[in-house]
């Protein structure tokens, strides 16, 4: 790749595949016999159920955590290993039912840990679990190389009472292997498909988390993002995706790309569910220096920011430079959304351009290449009983297993990263400084200060494009890069659809402005109710916009 990093080459679409494999020995409950829907997908009693809905079912004894897990496992079986074959789930946790039963016993004894008690959640396969599941980043090279302990976010989820139901498919190595990748494809899982149009891409890199949550294979899911990998698949799959401030959520135990930009975050069918999840995920971790500012601080309950009148008086900027004009469809949806915000009492500052938009593509890629080599080598070296200890080892593995790992695209990014020197190189230090200056002080912060803004708004991306294994990803780049490079929060909310495909709108702002973004995003969601459940159609509905 001779050109600067183009987000289109890292974040967009995917290609058709068959059924995803469940873990060896994983339980495969038979789905209840029901009449098929017009799409061929059987009805599902937990479809679109919120976390609050599931808690009510457990409180009333209509369900237990174990029975919820069994029902979601049957849903996975119906949609992933047969039916539309979404290839969203790589494996089901063989211990999920036992864990759920223990949580049911706690509930029966009068102990309920909180809103996630007994709730089945899927996590991306680059998030480590110290159990019988694999953590592979989608690569065949890491099969069998299990981490010694849970990632910090997994520990927090378990402590909150969530059941880790399984691991989701992803763009292999979080979409940082090839310049011509098809997002959502991994050597381990094949190509993830979009439940709104099976020939469309779920986007990446958290493609499986997006498709699975959209298709009600779980209560909600966890993704990770370096630049767009939570918000882009959430856009394509009609979800709320929240990329938090870097340092709010620990990265310990997550397969890395960049310690400057990486973070995990929630992907859910509602803003309220995303707030519940982020409340559980956020917190200090002594092993991740980025979370140092949280030491000794009381946890924040983001559900307290959910206000249906939260748009009233909010000052929202519209950064048209570079962030509009990429997709006529998404522009039309956002223009309609802006009118809704005005109606709900928001003060719209239009335009509120970010002068530095588009000026960090080359420096961002430079930073990511350097940090990927350093951070991934350190991660690989930490794995017990892992024969592949460096990126060069992975390059060699891929070359030796080209038919399985590189049937459609190569490893140009791996090779570029391997060619980089240490993090003491002047080129790296200068690129980090440039990114921070242009994205923060001279970028988002400057625009928000000048216009006294609560947040900025833009289209997250365009509607999902077709899967293309020949040419790889294509399509509009979206609005994720500036908040990603800055390490600032970014939330996408369903705002409309185009030919039956979801289109999301992103609200982003200053560091640690999660409460403000939750307030505004929730009010917008409640005013529009734009999310529609997936149809599992073979293709987009070209007869209806």
Image (cartoon, rainbow, N blue to C red):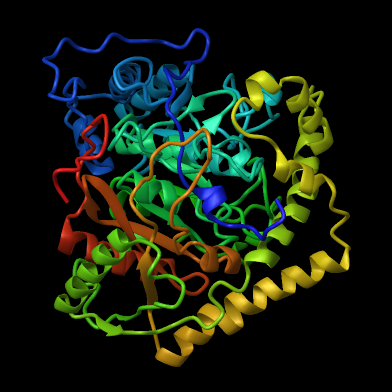
Residue 173 in percent (x, y) is at 63, 38
Give the left or right position of residue 507, taking residue 400 as reference. Answer: left
- Horizontal relation, residue 20 to residue 274: left or right: right
Residue 517, horizontal then vertical, whole percent? 37, 68
Q: Position of residue 494 (x, y in %)?
A: 28, 54
Give left or right: position of 226 versus 242: right
Q: Residue at x 88, y 55 (%)?
A: 422
Q: Nearer the viewer, residue 285 or 430?
A: 430
Camera-side residue of 10 and 48? 10
In the displayed structure, does residue 503 sit left or right of residue 407?
Answer: left
Against 254, is 144 above or below? above
Instruction: Residue at 26% x, 62% y: name it.
Output: 522
Residue 318 rendering spot, x and y as whole percentages: 36, 78
Please say if 16 is above or below 293: above
Q: What's the residue at 50%, 31% (across, down)? A: 169
Q: Quadrant of residue 418?
A: top right
Please give the name of the residue rendered at 51% of the width and 33% of the height, measured from the top-left corner: 469
Q: Quadrant of residue 421?
A: bottom right
Instruction: Give the total number of marks visible in the rendering.
Output: 0
């Amino acid at each position: 790749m001779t050109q600067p990093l183009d987000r289109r080459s890292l974040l967009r679409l995917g290609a058709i595949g068959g059924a995803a494999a469940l873990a060896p020995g994983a339980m495969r409950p038979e789905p209840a016999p029901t009449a098929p829907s017009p799409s061929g997908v059987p009805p599902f009693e937990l479809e679109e159920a919120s976390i609050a809905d599931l808690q009510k079912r457990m409180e009333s004894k209509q369900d237990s955590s174990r029975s919820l897990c069994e029902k979601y496992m049957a849903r996975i079986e119906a949609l992933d290993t047969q039916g539309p074959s979404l290839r969203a789930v790589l494996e089901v946790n063989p211990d999920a039912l036992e864990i759920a039963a223990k949580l049911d016993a706690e509930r029966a004894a009068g102990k309920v840990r909180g809103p996630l008690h007994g709730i089945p959640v899927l996590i991306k396969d680059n998030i480590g679990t110290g159990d019988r599941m694999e953590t592979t980043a989608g690569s065949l090279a890491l099969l069998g190389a299990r981490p010694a302990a849970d990632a910090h976010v997994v520990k927090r989820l378990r402590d909150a009472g969530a059941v880790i139901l399984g691991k989701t498919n992803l763009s292999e190595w979080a979409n940082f292997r090839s310049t011509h990748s098809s997002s959502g494809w991994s050597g381990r899982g094949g190509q993830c498909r979009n439940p709104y149009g099976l020939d469309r891409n779920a986007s990446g890199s958290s493609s499986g988390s997006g498709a699975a949550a959209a298709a009600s294979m779980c209560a909600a899911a966890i993704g990770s993002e370096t630049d767009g990998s939570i918000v882009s698949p959430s856009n394509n799959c009609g979800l709320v995706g929240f990329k938090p401030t870097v340092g709010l959520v620990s990265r310990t135990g997550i397969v890395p790309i960049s310690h400057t930009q990486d973070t995990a975050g929630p992907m859910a069918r509602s803003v309220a569910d995303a707030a519940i999840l982020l409340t559980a995920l956020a917190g200090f971790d002594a092993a991740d220096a980025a979370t140092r500012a949280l030491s000794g601080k009381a946890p924040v309950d983001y559900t307290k920011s959910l206000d249906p009148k939260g748009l009233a008086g909010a000052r929202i900027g519209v950064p048209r430079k570079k962030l509009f004009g990429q997709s006529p469809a998404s522009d039309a949806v956002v223009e309609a959304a802006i009118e809704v915000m005005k109606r709900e009492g928001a003060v719209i500052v239009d335009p509120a351009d970010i002068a530095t938009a588009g000026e960090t593509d080359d420096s961002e890629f430079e930073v990511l290449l350097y940090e990927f080599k350093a951070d991934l080598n350190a991660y690989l070296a930490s794995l017990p009983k892992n024969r592949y200890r460096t990126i060069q080892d992975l390059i060699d593995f891929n070359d030796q297993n080209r038919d399985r790992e590189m049937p459609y695209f190569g490893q140009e990014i791996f090779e570029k990263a391997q060619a980089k020197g240490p993090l003491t190189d002047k080129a790296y230090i200068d690129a980090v400084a440039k990114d921070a200056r242009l994205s923060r002080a001279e970028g988002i912060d400057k625009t928000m200060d000048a216009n006294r803004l609560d947040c900025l708004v833009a289209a997250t991306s365009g509607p999902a494009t077709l899967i293309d294994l020949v040419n790889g990803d294509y399509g509009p780049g979206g609005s994720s890069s500036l908040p990603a490079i800055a390490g600032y929060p970014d939330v996408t909310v369903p705002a409309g659809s185009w030919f039956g495909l979801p289109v999301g709108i992103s609200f982003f702002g200053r560091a640690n402005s999660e409460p403000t973004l939750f307030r505004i995003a929730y009010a917008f969601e409640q005013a529009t109710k734009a999310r529609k459940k997936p149809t599992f159609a073979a293709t987009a509905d070209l007869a209806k916009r």
